[in-house]
Image (spheres, grey):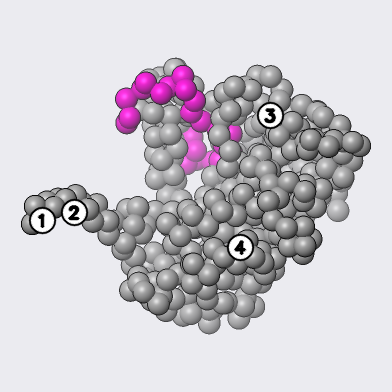
Amino acid sequence: MQKTIAVIRGDGIGPEIVDQALLVLDRISGLYGHEFTYIDVDMGGCAIDKYGDPLPEEMLQKCLAADSVLLGAVGGPKWNQVPGPMRPEKGLLRLRAGMEVYSNNRPAKIWPQLASASPLKPQIVEKGIDFLIVRELTGGIYFGRHDTFTEDGRTVAVDELRYSEDEIRRIGRIGFETARKRGGKLCSVEKSNVLDSSRLWKKVMHELADEYPDVVLTDMLVDNCAMQIVKDPGQFDVIVTENMFGDILSDEASMITGSIGMIPSSSLGDTSRGLYEPIHGSAPDIAGKDLANPIGTILAAAMMLRYSFDMAAEADCVESAVSAALDQGFRTGDILPPNSDGLTLVGCREMGRRIIENMKKG
């Protein structure tokens, strides 16, 4: 199979972690007979330095012409004084809008080898944590009407939480399709005991359920979900929810895994083309020092294989190789515990090499 990937190395540690992910994809290409073509795209601070624009139109068009986009990280203190509309992060927002990606998908997975880093009790972690949050990305309270005004001599602020049934239906389909590719369980999270928008959300989700008889749908109120994520995270497979709830729950979920450097994410829309990236930032303080953890970016590439290219076996190959490298005791600095007996500290390039060595066709 032939696929074109737009590659945004970005700023800080972005180039070095992306380089390792590309080497992993090259290995997949060799093992499974695929052909990946990489197109370099400048976005973020590096694009500001080159073009005075965090995402020139030409670069956006390259992304839109590709089958998917792999992103490292953007931003850093170097560009803190740049006017707001031209900040590196504005390039990312423009990219999401241009690609029309409305679904952010973030896994929360505890790797058994890193279980001691989780803040949860060992008896909870031992049950296993491996779920994915599908968050609606372009609607809800973040995109509703915002207004601050004076009423009866007092300052009043209003933020509108608005969803149409079409917006709910399209993110709901992403949730069902994702659950179908995982464990077949979908938890729809809302606040239907209080909010009209959530009652509409629940109604549409149950209408969709008739189209997916192979997926088990459950409902959960958002406050209960927040509690359950720390009480019994092993019960979840896929969670689908609206923008603000997803923002909060996905940040909570990322913390229970013990390391931000291990977590990838994807953003998807109506097509198979997606935007894939680790959830961490550009870490400019360690950029170029071969200290960064490339695993989040490598796992983002695995998500691309699974969800955009329908290459489940290839994604499994990458994830198994990551697990094997951890089993062998290799750790970058961010995942090396204080008691590191039997573990080996490695840099970004060496971690990538060790993962590639463990990649075998299943």
From the image, tell me which residue sits under label 3.
292
Contact, mark 1 vs mark 3 (Cβ under 8 Å): no
Sequence-first tag of 2 and 3: 2
Give residue 30's position: percent from left, percent from top.
80, 39
Give residue 310's position: percent from left, percent from top.
66, 56
User: Is residue 33 something that shows in the picture?
Assistant: no
The mark closer to the camera, 3 or 4, is 4
Badge 4: residue crowd in 10 Å (few <14, some 14–19, many ≥20): some
Residue displayed at 27% across by 56% down: 159
Amino acid beneath label 1 = Glu
Of all residues, the one furthest to the right in this rendering is: 342
From the image, tell me which residue sits under label 1.
151
Mark drawn on residue 229: 4
The mark closer to the camera, 2 or 3, is 2
Which element is circle 2 on?
A: strand
Mark drawn on residue 156: 2
Which element is circle 1 on?
A: strand
Amino acid beneath label 3 = Ala
Sequence-first tag of 2 and 1: 1
